[in-house]
Image: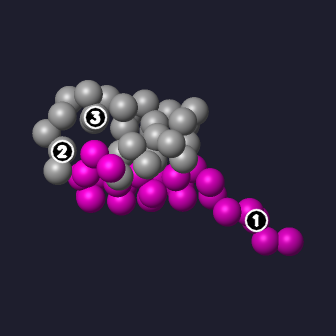
Protein backbone atom coordinates (compact mmCIF):
# COMPACT_ATOMS: atom_id res chain seq x y z
CA UNK A 1 0.00 0.00 0.00
CA UNK A 2 1.15 3.49 -0.75
CA UNK A 3 1.43 5.89 2.18
CA UNK A 4 -1.41 8.34 2.65
CA UNK A 5 -1.13 11.99 1.78
CA UNK A 6 0.91 14.24 4.05
CA UNK A 7 -1.91 16.29 5.53
CA UNK A 8 0.39 18.78 7.25
CA UNK A 9 2.31 19.43 4.04
CA UNK A 10 -0.97 19.99 2.19
CA UNK A 11 -2.17 22.36 4.92
CA UNK A 12 1.11 24.30 4.82
CA UNK A 13 0.90 24.53 1.04
CA UNK A 14 -2.66 25.86 1.25
CA UNK A 15 -1.61 28.41 3.87
CA UNK A 16 1.39 29.48 1.78
CA UNK A 17 -1.07 30.24 -1.02
CA UNK A 18 -3.10 32.38 1.36
CA UNK A 19 0.02 34.32 2.34
CA UNK A 20 0.98 34.82 -1.32
CA UNK A 21 -2.51 36.07 -2.12
CA UNK A 22 -2.39 38.35 0.90
CA UNK A 23 -6.05 39.28 1.07
CA UNK A 24 -8.32 39.48 4.07
CA UNK A 25 -10.77 37.23 2.24
CA UNK A 26 -8.15 34.49 1.73
CA UNK A 27 -7.17 34.52 5.42
CA UNK A 28 -10.80 34.48 6.55
CA UNK A 29 -11.58 31.58 4.21
CA UNK A 30 -8.65 29.58 5.60
CA UNK A 31 -9.85 30.18 9.15
CA UNK A 32 -13.39 29.08 8.26
CA UNK A 33 -12.10 25.90 6.60
CA UNK A 34 -9.59 24.98 9.32
CA UNK A 35 -10.60 26.77 12.54
CA UNK A 36 -8.75 24.43 14.90
CA UNK A 37 -5.50 24.07 12.98
CA UNK A 38 -2.45 25.92 14.40
CA UNK A 39 -2.06 27.78 11.10
CA UNK A 40 -5.51 29.28 11.66
CA UNK A 41 -4.01 31.08 14.65
CA UNK A 42 -1.28 32.48 12.40
CA UNK A 43 -4.02 33.62 10.02
CA UNK A 44 -5.88 35.32 12.88
CA UNK A 45 -2.68 37.10 13.89
CA UNK A 46 -2.13 38.28 10.31
CA UNK A 47 -5.68 39.65 10.25
CA UNK A 48 -5.13 41.42 13.56
CA UNK A 49 -1.94 43.09 12.28
CA UNK A 50 -3.80 44.46 9.26
CA UNK A 51 -2.14 45.77 6.14
CA UNK A 52 -3.80 43.19 3.89
CA UNK A 53 -5.18 43.79 0.41
Say which quadrant the N terminus sits in.
Answer: bottom right
**Label 2 neighbour load within 10 Å: few <14, some 14-19, many 20+:** some
Q: Are marks 2 and 3 in contact (CB under 8 Å)?
A: yes
Left or right: residue 38 versus residue 49 is right
Q: Are marks 1 and 3 in contact (CB under 8 Å)?
A: no
Q: Which sits in the foreground, 2 or 44?
A: 44
Check if residue 16 falls in the magenta segment.
Answer: yes
Check if residue 31 falls in the magenta segment.
Answer: no
- The residue depicted at 13 percent of the width and 39 percent of the height is 51
CA distance for labels 1 and 2: 38 Å
On the image, numbered disc 3 is attached to which residue? 47
CA distance for labels 2 and 3: 8 Å
> Residue 37, image x and y in percent?
55, 37
Left or right: residue 5 versus residue 19 is right
**Label 3 neighbour load within 10 Å: few <14, some 14-19, many 20+:** some
Q: Which residues are magenta?
A: 1-25
Secondary structure, mark 3, is helix
- The residue depicted at 44 percent of the width and 58 percent of the height is 13
Q: Which mark is residue 16?
A: none
Mark closer to the observer (1, 2) = 2
Chief SS of the magenta region: helix
Q: Examine the image and state in which quarter residue 49 appears.
A: top left
On the image, numbered disc 2 is attached to which residue? 52
- The residue depicted at 36 percent of the width and 32 percent of the height is 44
On the image, numbered disc 1 is attached to which residue? 3
Q: Earlier in the sequence, mark 1 or mark 3?
A: 1
Amino acid sequence: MAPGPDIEAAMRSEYDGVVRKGTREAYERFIRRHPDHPLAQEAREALAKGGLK
